[in-house]
Amino acid sequence: MAEFNQEEFNKFIEESGVYGFFKEAITLKSGRQSHFYANWRTVVGDVFLTEQLANYVIAFAKENNLEVETFYGVPDGATKLGIITQYTYAKQQENYAKGSAILAMGRKEPKPHGAPQDKYFIGMPKGKTLVLEDVTTTGGSLITALEGLKEAGVDVAGVISLTNRMEKRDDGQSVKEAVENIGVKFYNMSSSLDLLPLMYASLAPGEDVGKEIEKEFDEYGVEKIKLL
């Protein structure tokens, strides 16, 4: 995949069933209630689809001129994506050989003792590191991971979120603002503001669900959304 194509990636999201709707609200990892979800588990549970996704991520990084030596997935949601993306990327390099790249993996819960490289990682990232997250809502897990990376002295070149739900945190900041306020550039490969209208039209979950989602964005959204 030479270049990143947003329309093609959005189609990949649609065909992979990443978005879904609920008549009764569900509780998200952030603790918030919602009538829609963006879930990448089906994709990263399939080897073929994960390889496709990894190539999209690599193309997106190149499109944005991001320097990278290591792709690192936020534990646990993006761990598999980080490993497969790093493996795919390393094999594409001209200098691919023994010792040319590391497979980095983080711990969901830090060890209570030991040096930072052992406390936070099973395999510590090296060089310029791009941090991958599957879905960002309030960014809690992401920011915790970034704090661990910084404590360990990792050179974080940026964050890439597959899907940004485009919600404000309880402190009123967007995830992008919260991440960039700690000195890390934030990029999202897709936005719920762009995709929800398309998914709503395609899946037709009903007017009641549409009204509830519009209310969610009235309360939490970085901006309002129109589905009806």
Image (cartoon, rainbow, N blue to C red):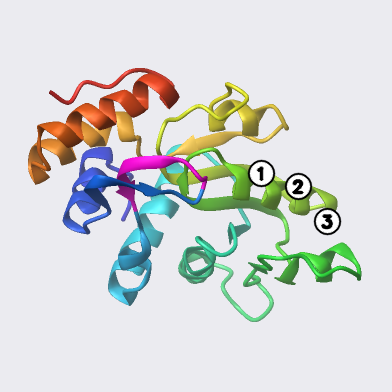
Q: What residue is rendered at 34% in x and 76% in y?
A: 47
Q: What residue is rendered at 48% in x and 40% in y?
A: 137
Q: Is residue 211 magenta?
A: no
Q: Is residue 197 left or right of residue 92?
A: left
Q: Main secondary structure of the magenta part?
A: strand
In which image quadrant can residue 188 be found?
top left
Dots 1 and 2: beta carbons under 8 Å? yes
In which image quadrant can residue 216 be found?
top left
For mark 2, what is the residue? Answer: 147
Find numbered disc 3 in the image and state the secondary structure of the residue it sits on: loop
Q: Can you say which quadrant of the picture contains the C terminus? A: top left
Q: Which mark is residue 152?
A: 3
Report how far apart the C-alphas of labels 3 and 2 lie in the structure. Answer: 9 Å
Q: What residue is rendered at 43% in x and 21% in y?
A: 222
Report how far apart the C-alphas of labels 3 and 1 lie in the structure. Answer: 14 Å
Q: Which mark is residue 143?
A: 1
Could you say where residue 196 lies in the image, as x and y percent from the top left? 24, 35
- Residue type pointed to by label 2: Glu
What segment carries the magenta color? 30-38
- Residue type pointed to by label 3: Ala
> Crowding at label 1, few (<14), some or many (≥20) Cα neighbours within 10 Å?
some
Labels 3 and 1: the sequence-earlier one: 1
> Crowding at label 2, few (<14), some or many (≥20) Cα neighbours within 10 Å?
few
Residue furthest bottom as drawn: 98
Residue furthest right as drawn: 114
Above or below, 65 relative to 76: above
Report how far apart the C-alphas of labels 1 and 2 lie in the structure. Answer: 6 Å
- For the residues carrying marks 3 and 1, which lies nearer the camera in this image? 1
